[in-house]
Image (tube, rainbow, N blue to C red):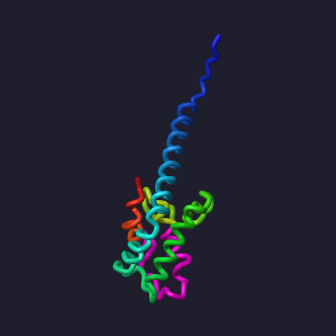
Amino acid sequence: MAHYSSNPYKNDSKTGNAIDRKRERERYLMVSKTQQEAERLSTLLVQRLIDKKVLETTDVDTMRDLFHKQMERLTQMEDFDVQFKIAPLRGLVNNPNFISLFLTQYIIEDLIDHPKVQDVYGDDEEIYQAVDSVMSVVRP
């Protein structure tokens, strides 16, 4: 005789697992695309931050190199470390791009103290919008 399981959470579990797999695949694709295009994206990002008057710097090349290193670093970080880094900004916007959140938090927390940075202007959301306007191309 066949065994019948009446677990009411079984379908929810399957759905949740499917959503998690889809989210993980999106994250993997986003990180891969960021790694492949890191040099171009870092150049575009620095230019956008300067054009939007978010970042004032004395050395554009150093800023580009710093963002390039952050994009490379992102590919080597554990998911927990990335989530910990972006935690303060997670509720900033609906459906955020985690890479844009990561780079925004980097600007707010770390880059502002760099000797080649004169100042960072704007609130968290304005900085995120400027970053995301460049980084949105990595979203599938």
Front-most of 94 and 133? 133
The vertical placement of 104 against 50, above or below, is above
Q: Residue at x 56, y 36 (%)?
A: 13
Q: Residue at x 39, y 68 (%)?
A: 129
Q: Residue at x 46, y 72 (%)?
A: 124
Tell how many labels: 0
Q: Residue furthest left?
A: 51
Which stretch appears magenta?
103-128
Residue 136 lies, in percent from the top left, at: 39, 61
Residue 8 lies, in percent from the top left, at: 57, 29
The vertical placement of 97 against 64, above or below, is above
Q: Residue at x 40, y 79 (%)?
A: 54
Dividing the picture into quadrants, the one containing residue 2 is: top right
Front-most of 12 and 41? 41
Residue 92 drawn in magenta: no
Q: Residue furthest top?
A: 1
Residue 96 lies, in percent from the top left, at: 45, 59
Side (left or right) of 74 relative to 128: right
Dividing the picture into quadrants, the one containing residue 135 is: bottom left
Front-most of 10 and 101? 101
Side (left or right) of 38 relative to 114: left
Residue 117 drawn in magenta: yes
Residue 28 lies, in percent from the top left, at: 51, 53
The N terminus sits in image quarter = top right
